[in-house]
Image: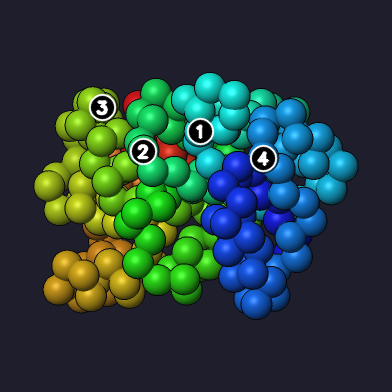
Amino acid sequence: MRVVIAEDNVLLAEGLTLVLASAGFEVAARAADSPGFLAAVAEHAPDVCIVDVRLPPAYRDEGIHAALRARKEHPGLPVLVFSQYVEETYAGELLSDGRGGVGYLLKDRVARVEEFLDSLRRVAAGGTAMDPEVVRQLLTRRHDPVDALTPREREVLALMAEGHGNAAIARRLVVTERAVHKHVGNIFVKLDLHPDDTGHRRVQAVLAYLRR
């Protein structure tokens, strides 16, 4: 799996490269700024990208702007944003095209290497991987169709947004997997996602929930 990294911190970029290489990923290119990242994406056609939100020259939101542009120029390009901050507006915009293949992890909250690699694989496969704090901040300012969900359904969908499967959700909520399956079905109905919808309904549910 080919990866392009946009990270100006040399030590962090080198660390990511070593971790990815040891896990069987191929780091096709590393870039320290937005123009370099966009050029690398165009040249290498990666399977997934890792992008820091804040890149030179201003260290504000150059990275996520570059990620948005890359997904516009290369529709469906999987992007995992790796940041110290939650940029709510741009995180919501990243989710808004409904294509999936997006993740947003906070650097200080990644507890284990394997968790990070699992998140990266989910994003590359077209799924989502959202830090719980990102989910919390995005949901505090969204109302529709969240209001139609029960508190338990919100819990289930928030854990879906983090990338957990039904079995993992059941363990976390201390309920049966059958109960989680029922909640997921109710969520699909309330978000008006039908079996004949194009795309993966689980991903579509997460995106619909987070972007409204």
Numbered disc in front, either 1 or 3: 1
Inter-mark Cα distance, 1 to 2: 9 Å
* Mark before the other along the chain sequence, 3 or 2: 2
Element on which disc 2 rests = loop
Which residue in the protein does label 3 denote? 142
Q: Is residue 178 above or below residue 66?
A: below
Q: Residue at x 44, y 53 (%)?
A: 129
Disc 2: CA contacts within 10 A as few (<14), some (14-19) or many (>=20): some
Element on which disc 4 rests = loop
Q: Residue at x 23, y 26 (%)?
A: 141
In the shown orientation, is residue 91 left or right of residue 122?
left
* Mark before the other along the chain sequence, 4 or 3: 4
Q: Residue at x 53, y 67 (%)?
A: 117
Count of numbered circles in the view: 4
Q: Are marks 1 and 2 in contact (CB under 8 Å)?
A: yes
| Quarter of the image that includes the C terminus | top left
Q: Is residue 16 above or below residue 75?
A: below
Which residue in the protein does label 1 denote? 54
Residue 92 visible in the current orientation: no
Element on which disc 3 rests = loop
Q: Position of residue 46 (x, y in %)?
A: 76, 51
